[in-house]
Amino acid sequence: MKWNSDRSLQLSLWCTRLAMVLVVVSGAASGSIVTWYLRVSGKTVELHLPITAALLLCCIPAMGALLWLHKLLSNINDSRVFVDENVTLLRRISWCCFLAAGITLVSSRFYLVFLLISVAAAFMGLILRVVKNVIQQAVILRTENELTI
């Protein structure tokens, strides 16, 4: 069984689906997860509410990003790569990253580790914006090319 781009794409789709399940499970079990984390890390119990709230709030943009990522991968699987819909999907995914960055930035007031997560989420959002701009230019070039033929 040789590895190829189709198998890579299928793996990406399955990993996206698994991540969706993990977001739902982590959201549903957030209280228990945070309780466990506070116990093993030796952190104060007063952090339970802000960490749980941040975790639950971040589940919203995470699930949105994963749903749109799944749609993007499905489009690519259907050979729809340089289309306006993918530009829109990348834009939405990047905004989800920026929203998560905002949530964790505010949450860093209670727990400083969230500041690192905020920077990472904002950086990912920025990278996605650059990719979105590249795809957007490719859509324009493809459209112009189709008009000249």
Image (cartoon, helix red, strand yellow):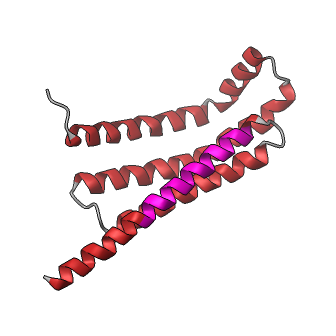
Question: What is the quadrant of residue 83 in the picture?
Answer: bottom left
Percent position of residue 46, x then y: 86, 30
Question: What is the quadrant of residue 50 in the picture?
Answer: top right
Q: Relative to residue 68, is residue 50 drawn left or right?
A: right
Question: What is the quadrant of residue 85 in the picture?
Answer: bottom left
Percent position of residue 30, x then y: 65, 32
Q: Relative to residue 114, is residue 8 drawn left or right?
A: left
The majority secondary structure of the magenta stretch comes to helix
| Residue extent of the magenta highlight | 114-133
Residue lying at 84% horizontally and 25% vertically, measured from the top left: 45
Residue 73 vertical placement versus 26 (above, below): below
Residue lying at 20% horizontally and 84% vertically, measured from the top left: 147
Q: 77 or 146, which lies in front?
A: 146
Q: Relative to residue 30, is residue 12 drawn left or right?
A: left
Percent position of residue 62, x then y: 55, 46
Residue 112 vertical placement versus 69 (above, below): above
Say which quadrant the C terminus sits in: bottom left
